[in-house]
Image (cartoon, coloured by chain):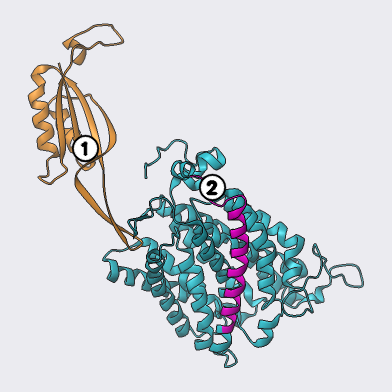
Chain colours: A orange, B cyan
Amino acid sequence: MKKIEAIIRKSKYTAVKDALHEVGVSFFSYWDVTGVGNEKEGHVYRGVSYSTSDIQRRHLSIVVNDDFEEITVKTIIEASSTGQVGDGKIFVIDIIDAYRIRTGEKGNSTLN
Amino acid sequence: MELLTINNVWMMICTALVFFMHTGFAFLEIGLTRQKNTINILFKNIFIITAGLLLYYIGGFNLMYPGEFNGFLGFAGFGIDAPLAASGTLDLAYNGGYTYWTDFLFQGMFAATAATIVSGAVAERMKIGAFMIFTILYVGIIYPIAGSWKWGGGFLDQMGFYDFAGSTLVHSVGGWAALVAVWLLGPRIGKFKNGIAQAIPGHNIPLATAGVLILWLGWFGFNGGSVLSADPELTSLTLVTTCLAAAAGGIIAASVSLIRYKNLDLTMFLNGILGGLVGITAGADVMTPESAIIIGAIAGALIVFAVSFIDAIKLDDPVGAIAVHLICGIWGTLAVGIFSTNPEHTFLIQLTGVACYAAFCILASFLIIFTLKKTIGIRVSEKEELEGLDAHEHGMDSYPDFRLNEH
């Protein structure tokens, strides 16, 4: 099992979610995050220019069986890329085990 | 009798509108500051209106309108004492425009405004206790004495100085104190880095916008009521000049800001509207609509330059109170000497009035705030300022379900 952590633009969230559903990845968790990165946003407030590197993004956490890793990553990249700085990153992490709380079963079947 | 009833109803509506301006001030101030200080600012605003009214009852009204006096300082006694007719009912011959009670309440609503102006300028770093003591002294004593010089029939009134609804008497009186307070307090942590002004964005711009529109509405009463009757010509002219100046102030401030900074800054737009309103207040009943537009427009331009000038001299005024109330208050008062349709209003006398108020208000506010600084202290600790005045001065959170930003 793999955990795929993707940090994407908020504006691309709906596109990514729909694309993942199409390839059969239908459940995951997400939350909004603030981070710093290469992208800088320029602002002017009451005559004072400032740039903030605090960037708002959406963080997706998706646990899939090994055979789904490639298609999940590919789908996220295709759906969320704009080609501009600040598109985000994807991390893949090994998951040791998984349990379904309702039934107590463990292993790959918990992700079906 | 019927005319008095109509006049009095108008004056009570205006009283209510001026009261409502405190909502506008509160919204504007919290909108242009950070959420960690919201309770503190609201607390100050609520304290000002409640304490202000009581203080005006205790001594303010009779200090501001002492009747016959030497022109500089008079006092007609504590409390308010309504004149009675022979039959034992209220003496309606008191004034053709309003009753004694309306007079007290309308003027009482004005009194609190002067301290509200200071509240915004010292936001996010002043000790609440020190601010409350300052408010009591400034609203209870200084504002009424200053007011008596003109509206109470004092020496400036006799000299021919004109301030219709308070560009100087309310706005500059508050503005001078704001200037002194900001200077003695010092800037917020993080406002200046290596001598360069930094942006500390306000946390709720929609609320600031609502605040400005509420203030504009309140100004219908502030200026409209300053006619002191429902005189059909003067009240309607006053509302026209007031609104045209507000509109011109906003448009010009936004335009100048766009040309100077290449962005459409809503907060400058909002401050420009207020600048136009403050500017027209001194002469709203003696202007042609064209003059009102010019006065508002110049006030709007002044705002943009004043905000950056105040930054440049290392003063930190989070909501632009000094630019709006002091700079535009002075401009509006002087503008009466330039644009008034009444030839008796002259620039020199207007300038004399501005100078008298500057000297008195700077001296009085310096004495009060400097004494507070040397005794109980006026500034919260660094830890309190960084973590927010809400948590330390009040032990409360204005939006418990929202996460705080780190800046």
Q: Are marks 1 and 2 in contact (CB under 8 Å)?
A: no
Residue depicted at x 49% and y 50%: B125
Q: Position of residue B59 (x, y in %)?
A: 76, 63
**Tag 2: residue type?**
Asn
Disc 2 sits on a residue from what chain? B
User: Looking at this view, is A107 or A35 the one in front?
Assistant: A35
Q: Secondary structure at mark 2?
A: helix
Residue depicted at x 43% and y 65%: B271
The segment highlighted magenta reads B352-381
Q: Position of residue A18 (x, y in %)?
A: 18, 33
Which residue bears the numbered disc 2?
B40
Disc 1 sits on a residue from what chain? A
Q: Position of residue A13 (x, y in %)?
A: 21, 37
User: Looking at this view, is B50 or B87 the one in front?
Assistant: B50
- What count of labels does the image hold? 2
Q: Secondary structure at mark 1?
A: helix
Task: Choose mark 1 or mark 2, whichever is in front.
Answer: 2
Q: Is residue B372 magenta?
A: yes
Quadrant location of the C terminus of chain B in the rendered image: top left
Q: Is residue A98 magenta?
A: no
Question: In the drawing, does residue B202 fall left or right of residue A6?
Answer: right
Classify A25 as above or below B407.
Answer: above
Mark 2 burial class by Cα count in 10 Å: few <14, some 14-19, many 20+ = many
Residue B312 visible in the shown view: yes
Mark 1 burial class by Cα count in 10 Å: few <14, some 14-19, many 20+ = many
Residue depicted at x 10% and y 17%: A66
Which residue bears the numbered disc 1?
A13
**Tag 1: residue type?**
Tyr
